[in-house]
Amino acid sequence: MKLSNAISQKILKICMEKNITPNKLASICCLTQSTVQNLIVGKSNNPKLLTIIRICEGLNISLKDFFDDELFAKIERED
């Protein structure tokens, strides 16, 4: 699985767990709706770590908790 796909799936999983929409996530994390949408649809092939950190901070989870998922076990390079 590509990193962008894993990140997309993880964001959607968190939204479902916390019962929030991607637009609400953007608002909570002080990100634009387009940034979150691009992450979700896989348009952002190389998401910045700072964006993931903002998502984690907005949701009160650690970066470790974000990446501690089977989704990230076998990541393919995208370069």
Image: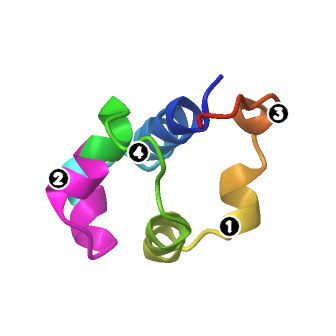
Q: Residue at x 43, y 37 (%)?
A: 12
- Nearer-N-terminus badge (4/2): 4
- Nearer-N-terminus badge (2/3): 2
Which class describes the residues within 10 Å of circle 4: few (<14), some (14-19), or many (20+)?
A: some
- Could you say which quadrant of the image residue 35 lies in? bottom left
Q: Is residue 39 visible?
A: yes
Q: Which mark is residue 73?
A: 3
Q: Give the label, 2 or 1, closer to the camera.
A: 2
Residue type at mark 1 is: Leu
Left or right for 36, reference 47: left
- Residue 60 drawn at (x, y percent): 55, 74
Instruction: From this view, report whether residue 57 is shown above or below residue 56.
Output: below
Q: Give the label, 4 or 1, closer to the camera.
A: 1
Span shown in magenta? 25-37
Q: Residue at x 72, y 59 (%)?
A: 65
Question: Disc 1 designates what residue?
Answer: 63
- Nearer-N-terminus badge (4/3): 4
Question: Disc 4 designates what residue?
Answer: 15
- Nearer-N-terminus badge (2/1): 2
Q: CA distance from mark 2 to mark 3?
A: 27 Å
- Nearer-N-terminus badge (1/3): 1
| Quadrant holding the N terminus | top right
Which class describes the residues within 10 Å of circle 2: few (<14), some (14-19), or many (20+)?
A: few
Question: Disc 2 designates what residue?
Answer: 34
Whether the residues at callouts 4 and 1 have beta carbons within 8 Å, the answer is no
Residue type at mark 2 is: Ser
Q: Nearer the viewer, residue 45 or 29?
A: 45
Q: CA distance from mark 4 to mark 2?
A: 16 Å
